[in-house]
Amino acid sequence: MFFLISLHFCRKGKSRNDATMCDLVLLGLVAISLTKPPVATVAPKKEWGGHGSSINLKEIMIGRCFDYLENVNPSAGVKDCAKIWEEFLKVFSGKDPCSIKEQDYNNFLRLVEHDIPVNQSIFWSQTREITSKFSEITASFMPLESTLSGYLVNDLNWCGSRSIKGPNFVSCPSWNDCENNAARSFWRSASKLYASKAQGVVTVMLNGSSTANAFRDTSIFAEIEVGNLDKAKVTLVRLWIIDNLMGPDIESCGRGSVGKLELILMEKGIKYICEDNYRPVQILLCVNKVDFPTCNLDLAP
Ligand code: NFD
């Protein structure tokens, strides 16, 4: 269009100088149109089955970092949020998203590391929501998701691609697409460090209604966390086996996969106690289900 309008005005030009000027402008336009590659209109290819990296990943993580250090847990100390983001990005930017190893996060984890208060480590498996709510409401626990490493990325998605720098916002391998995906390797690596730092009384919340074993062999809790508990630092493990309010009651202390966990702790020389349906957790589950039989709060004087 612009080209045609220019041509029209050139034709109207009277003097010789005008005409030469126009010729040069037109020549320039033609040259630009020939050298500039066409703008891509096709969306980037979806290589993987999972969602792409979270939109605004960088801004969210840097924002969370400042919030954590300023408001959530100032005792984590002074840290450089911009550097933390750079180290995180380095792990996966420009790389095959199925070749991210646990060790790749070492530098990042070193930058975000801080103390975990004694008696506040809490592990979970298939009880993510209730553990998170219970920790928040009691303010007595610091699960991995409340340490800086977990807080920065909890509920986010991320990966890279060999063909681009930065996060791949189009698609990422899902959890089971490949073993060494960015998210899975992160959680394995962060869980290992988190478990190795546990001190004093350690709490574990497992799902007593799970049909896939409360203590599942391939879970991160079973594969990574239990093995990395340091017997010299852990004085007691409290196991809480919590059934869904409507049941079924599949797993209990001393039996099935929970019994297997108890044996592992015994062999490691770590003391433990086990309680089925620890009442304070059950009461929290009951908050919006007061009519359930299990929720009979027995308020009679
Ligand atoms: P889980 P866990 N497919 O409930 N942690 O013992 C997909 F899509 O079985 C924290 O393995 O317990 N996602 C987080 C999966 C993540 C699949 C991992 C699967 N087949 C580990 N399996 C976190 N905050 O997100 C597992 N996942 C994902 C540490 C899914 O996001 C904690 O310190 C699910 O919610 C905790 O003590 C999550 O992994 C222990 O490891 C947990 O699966 C929990 O790992």
Image (spheres, rainbow, N blue to C red):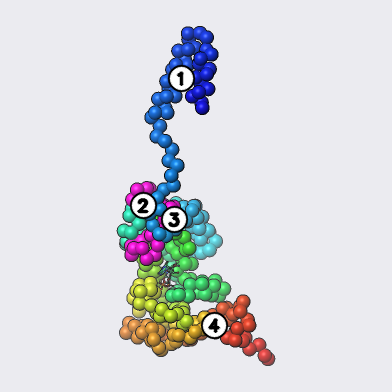
- How crowded pointer 1 is (Cα within 10 Å; few <14, some 14-19, many 20+) is rated as some
Amino acid type indicated by mark 2:
Ser
Marks 4, 3: nearer the viewer = 4
Q: Are marks 4 and 2 in contact (CB under 8 Å)?
A: no
* SS state under label 1: helix
Marks 4, 2: nearer the viewer = 4
Q: Main secondary structure of the magenta part?
A: loop
Precedes in sequence: disc 3 or disc 2: 3
Residue 55's mark? none
Amino acid type indicated by mark 4:
Met
Q: Residue at x 57, y 86 (%)?
A: 294
Q: Residue at x 44, y 58 (%)?
A: 51
Horizontal side of 96 relative to 57 (left or right) equals: left
Q: Can residue 138 be seen here?
A: yes
Precedes in sequence: disc 3 or disc 1: 1
Q: Residue at x 40, y 25 (%)?
A: 31
**Cα–Cα gap, marks 4 and 3:** 36 Å
Residue 246's mark? 4
Which residue is tagged 1? 25
Amino acid type indicated by mark 1:
Val
Q: Magenta span has 96?
A: no
Marks 1, 2: nearer the viewer = 1
Q: Are marks 1 and 2 in contact (CB under 8 Å)?
A: no
Which residue is tagged 3? 53
Precedes in sequence: disc 4 or disc 1: 1
* SS state under label 2: loop
* SS state under label 3: loop
Residue 161's mark? 2
Label 1 CB less than 8 angstroms from ligand 1: no
